[in-house]
């Protein structure tokens, strides 16, 4: 059973993602260049991470331990950068709801594949029939929302 504390924490993190997309798009407009917003956001994220790391561990990362990591382990920074850039540029064009829907569906499918095959060294958690049904429901939900958004509402006279 999943810890309610961790479930709530995860939900909060997920709930803040669309807000981040909206605020970063607004920041890009304020700066006059959408591509500058992720730079500012990531500088703020770096500062906040540094303060939290120092506050909670009373230390900084040991730079010599970086040599123990595999090159692919550093790709997370590139992924964060790509996500933030994507949210900044696409959310205003697609709508925050559509951007998040596509992201969540893809995260769900990708997570299931990673768990099922134990990719990147994670513990294998085979995708059960019930979990597969849940994933299909999420995909169907995406299709329905896109179909519904393509329907033009009748004009009000």
Image (tube, grey):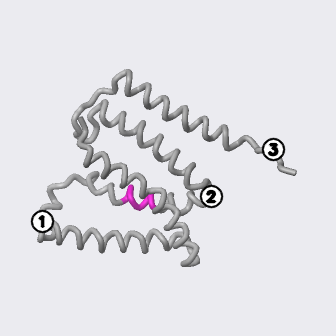
Foreground pick, 82 / 5: 5
Question: Contact (CB < 8 A) between labels 2 and 1?
Answer: no
Instruction: Give the percent coordinates (x, y) of residue 140.
Output: 55, 32
Query: Which secondary structure class fits the magenta region best?
Result: helix
Query: Mark 1 or mark 3, which is nearer the start of the sequence?
Result: 1
53 magenta-colored: no
Name which quarter of the figure residue 110 lies in.
top left
Query: Mark 3 or mark 2, which is nearer the start of the sequence?
Result: 2
Magenta residues, start to end: 78-84
Q: Left or right: 155 with respect to 8?
A: right
Query: Mark 1 or mark 2, which is nearer the start of the sequence?
Result: 1
Q: How far separated are the C-alphas under marks 2 and 3?
A: 23 Å
> What residue lies at 17% left-to-right and 61% top-to-bottom?
66
Task: State the residue position of label 3.
Answer: 154
Taking 105 as reference, is 51 above or below it?
below
Element marked by disc 3: loop
> What residue lies at 26% left-to-right and 48% top-to-bottom?
6
Question: Contact (CB < 8 A) between labels 2 and 3?
Answer: no
Task: State the residue position of label 1.
Answer: 64
Instruction: Give the percent coordinates (x, y) of residue 119.
Output: 28, 37
Name which quarter of the figure residue 46 lies in.
bottom left
Foreground pick, 94 / 148: 148
Taking 117 as reference, is 36 above or below it?
below
Q: How far separated are the C-alphas under marks 2 and 1?
A: 43 Å
Q: Left or right: 1 with respect to 31?
A: left
Element marked by disc 1: helix
Label drawn at residue 93 = 2
Taking 62 as reference, is 86 above or below it?
above
Instruction: Give the percent coordinates (x, y) of residue 117.
Output: 30, 31
For disc 1, the neighbor class at 10 Å (few under 14, some 14 to 19, many from 20) is few
Q: Left or right: 104 with respect to 155?
A: left
For disc 2, the neighbor class at 10 Å (few under 14, some 14 to 19, many from 20) is few
């Amino acid at each position: 059973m999943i810890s309610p504390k961790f479930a709530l924490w995860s939900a909060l993190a997920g709930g803040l993602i669309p807000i981040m997309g909206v605020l970063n798009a607004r920041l890009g407009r304020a700066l006059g260049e959408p591509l500058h917003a992720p730079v500012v956001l990531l500088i703020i994220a770096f500062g906040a991470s540094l303060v939290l790391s120092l506050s909670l561990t009373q230390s900084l990362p040991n730079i010599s331990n970086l040599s123990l990591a595999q090159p692919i382990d550093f790709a997370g920074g590139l992924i964060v950068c790509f996500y933030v850039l994507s949210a900044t540029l696409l959310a205003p064009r697609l709508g925050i709801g559509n951007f998040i829907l596509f992201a969540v569906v893809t995260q769900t499918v990708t997570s299931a594949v990673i768990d099922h095959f134990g990719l990147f060294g994670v513990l294998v958690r085979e995708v059960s029939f019930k979990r597969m049904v849940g994933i299909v429901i999420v995909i169907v939900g995406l299709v329905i929302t896109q179909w519904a958004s393509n329907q033009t509402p009748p004009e009000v006279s």
